[in-house]
Amino acid sequence: AGKPHQLTEVSVLGLGAMGSVLASTLLDAGRSVTVWNRTPGRAPELAARGARVVDSVRAAVTASPVVVACLLDHSSVQATLGPVADALRGRTLVNVTTTTPNESRALASWAADHGIDHLDGAIMAVPAMIGSGTGQIFYSGSRAAYDRLQPTFDLWAASEFHGADAGRAALVDLAMLSGMYQMFTGFFHGAAMVAAMGMSAPEFAARQAPFLAAMTQELAAYAKVIEGGDYTVPGQQSLHFSDLSHLVQASAEEGVDPAPIAAVQTLISREIAAGRGEEGLARVYEGLRAGGA
Ligand code: FVH
């Protein structure tokens, strides 16, 4: 018994850094893989390992019941798939290209109009992590397609289904990346500040990494406050206490652009100005949800 397992033949459109490794992992697992790339000759090693290389999107689409698109962006997906909508009818399209939630929904709607079973995938991994037991890929869209294909998706990374709304996987992906980019930028800012007094970036990283790791333990507590919606509960660091003027000033005094921390200060100041200075830092979440109003 077990889950029905369909994904023995797969076509991969796009052989960039990510598409190549997705195809390669499927070959490792003994799958029949057909590949296409706009610019020919991009991944000769895939051909050497048994992938069927075709020179048209249509040939790739008609070769397999499952088509994986791993292209640059939404426009390249539209440009590539638009002309072969008829050939995709009755097949499953898994688009792992990074898109916004609304772009994912637009593709889902286009797919539904053309009788294509569609699943959106958001890759939380760099190519080196694919097939290595690390990383995650979020999916949303066709539940039936996800259930059928999950054993194969698990060859790439841990798979997680986020619901029938095709935009959800992309939204969770981009929300996760928002935290990551702001953390990295915070590190760059701190490293620039201490560079002014001669501390090297590796030296600063050695201090910053364990500190940030310890701070991530606070996320669950903040989440609990947000969930409860009461920012006055005792034990929280107040917005007044979180005034970042000294931090912004120190950055400027060292000749370092305070923009990253000034952005955080603006969010805090807005809450203080609205009379909520005694409330906890997590109140910023509500200000963000209000759209900056
Ligand atoms: N690489 C990564 O670490 C990230 C991890 C998170 C998810 N992303 C997203 O995956 C998509 C593909 O990324 P990639 O790393 O494979 O990207 P490239 O190596 O730059 O390859 C891009 C492929 O897209 C093809 N392409 C570009 N424009 C078009 C077009 N108009 N029509 C058809 N194909 C197009 C390009 O073909 P070529 O330039 O070789 O002809 C490559 O195959 C991406 O959404 C990431 O955000 C990866």
Image (tube, rainbow, N blue to C red):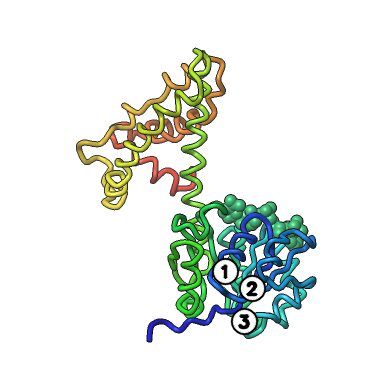
Q: Report which residue position mark 2 lands on.
A: 33
| Front-most of residues 227 and 177 | 177
SS label for mark 3: loop
**Is residue 293 at least partly visible in the picture?**
no
Check disc 3 and give the amino acid type.
Pro
- Dot placed on the residue nearer the N-terminal end, 1 or 2: 1
Residue at coordinates 68% horizontally, 73% vertically from top-left?
34
SS label for mark 1: helix
Residue at coordinates 24% horizontally, 40% vertically from top-left?
232
C-alpha separation, residue under disc 3 versus residue under disc 2:
11 Å
Specify whether 65 is left or right of 225.
right
| Front-most of residues 141 and 51 | 51
Q: Is residue 126 above or below residue 241?
A: below
| Front-most of residues 79 and 44 | 44
Check disc 1 and give the amino acid type.
Leu
C-alpha separation, residue under disc 1 versus residue under disc 2:
7 Å
Query: Label 2 near label 1: C-beta < 8 Å?
Result: yes
Q: Report which residue position mark 1 lands on.
A: 26
C-alpha separation, residue under disc 3 versus residue under disc 1:
15 Å
